[in-house]
Image: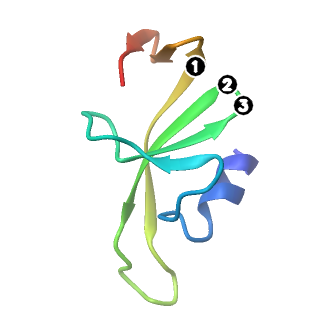
Amino acid sequence: MDAVDDNLRHQPDVPTRHRKPMRPNFLAPWELRVGDYRVFHDVEPEADEAEGPEVVILAVGLKIGNQVWIGGEEHEL
């Protein structure tokens, strides 16, 4: 959770080494890599300039090889 907070607190809509925009898919427009985990999220526009954009976590998955498992089900992204 600390890694998610550290990576998404500031400029969550800027690609980095661990955070990237995804190709269009059914799940989320952004992916954050944290070890073997993938945090799929969206960034809502700034509602209040002082607070910055709002990050919405849509799913957390476990990556094993070329497979991503979310809620015990394999998903293709």
Is residue 28 toward the left or the right of residue 12 in the image? left
Mark 1 surroundings: few (<14), some (14-19) or many (≥20) residues within 10 A: some
Instruction: Give the camera-side residue of 7 and 71.
Output: 7
Q: CA distance from mark 2 to mark 3?
A: 4 Å
Mark found first going from the N terminus, 1 or 2: 2
Question: Given the current orientation, which residue lies at the most extreme bottom position?
Answer: 50
User: Residue 6's image quarter?
Assistant: bottom right
Return the residue at label 2.
36
Q: Measured along the vertical axis of the image, is residue 59 above or below residue 1?
A: above
Return the residue at label 3.
35
Q: Secondary structure at mark 2?
A: loop
| Amino acid under disc 2 | Asp
Q: Are marks 2 and 3 in contact (CB under 8 Å)?
A: yes
Residue at position x 67%, y 24% in the image: 36
Q: From the top left corner, tell me how far across and down residue 29 is, in percent.
A: 35, 47
Return the residue at label 1.
63
Q: From the top left corner, tell me how far across and down residue 14 is, in percent.
A: 52, 65
